Amino acid sequence: MNKILTTTKFVTENSNHVKINKPAIKEFCKTFSESHINHWLNESPFDFSQLNDKEKLHFLLVFDAMSFSYWGEPKWTIEYKGEKFDGAWGMIASLGKAIENKKPILSPEYLRGISEKDLNAILKGNTEIPLLAERKKILTEVGSALLKDFDGDFSNLIKEANHDAVNLLDLILKHFPSFNDFSSYKGKTIYFQKRAQLLVADINQMFGGEGYGKMENMDEITACADYKLPTVMRKKGILEYSKKLEDKIDNKVEILRNSEEEVEIRASTIWANEFIKKELKKQIKNINSIHVNDHLWLLGQIKSSEDKPYHRTRTTAY
């Protein structure tokens, strides 16, 4: 068992605020079919076919480096080709728009020297995106590391990983420290690695498991613990919150980063996803954690007036 699963298991076994409802998991799995295995990027507002393979790699790196903390009042929203997008779709649309406007957003030289003003213009929406300065700092790190360690070419890191998902995850964490995502809980270090795991999964699935996307050990990649998945799991009755935590979330009270409540939400999300995968493997042998992750995330994009709020934590982790 990898350290993400090992350490988050400790949290679920000692959780005070979040519980996993296993009967609800069985009910949810009855509604799942093989047709639900669909990578979330297939629904993207940006057409990736206009990029070559190395550009696709750099796009995923830049996107996953900045894909976090979209919530706010009002929520950051951008317009792209006559439609409005927020969250991850908004980030992808913003990067797509920049590329179409000939901004060198995929160039490591440009990233290394990008200014906060330039990035703000690229991400211009109805309001300034949260944590703009942090996003700028991360892009500078990404550009600098690419130039210093990989001749400005992210595909060299893919080659160094030797088509192994675990190796790739470790290399991302080593060379891009801003991707390192962990917390402390009851005296123990708990690992999540949300954006790093998402980057590995996105590369694997963007290329259909071939070429740059051909990877062994994809089964070692867990769910990407964010704020969308637990919202869907709560709606389905899979995650159950204490009354105190429910009230905080429903009243949009910020859940502090590294608090017991936040760590328990994230750890329980990962393990509920694992239990869903285990149940589904009885009927779909090749299903992995990311397949389940993506289905839940896409369900979270279907808005309803009855939806309850997601938990709000201001962080670069997700």
Image (cartoon, helix red, strand yellow):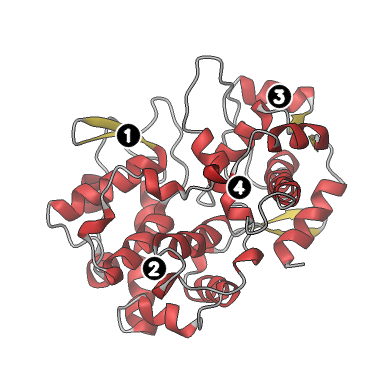
Label 1 close to label 4 by CB (< 8 Å):
no
Q: Inspect the image, locate mark 4, and give the three-letter code of the amino acid beneath it.
A: Val
- State the SS at label 1: strand
Residue on which the image places disc 4: 292
Q: Can residue 233 be seen in this snapshot?
A: yes
Circle 1 packing at 10 Å, graded few (<14), some (14-19), many (20+), is some
Label 4 close to label 3 by CB (< 8 Å):
no
Circle 2 packing at 10 Å, graded few (<14), some (14-19), many (20+), is many
Q: Inspect the image, locate mark 2, and give the three-letter code of the amino acid beneath it.
A: Glu
In the picture as drawn, the residue positioned furthest to the left comes out as: 102
Q: Inspect the image, locate mark 3, and give the three-letter code of the amino acid beneath it.
A: Glu
Residue 85's disc is 1
Position of residue 57 relative to residue 11, above or below, is: below
Q: Earlier in the sequence, mark 4 or mark 2?
A: 2
Residue 141's disc is 2
Q: Quadrant of residue 33?
A: top right
Q: Quadrant of residue 208?
A: bottom left
Residue on which the image places disc 3: 246
Cα separation, mark 1 vs mark 2, equals 27 Å
Circle 4 packing at 10 Å, graded few (<14), some (14-19), many (20+), is many
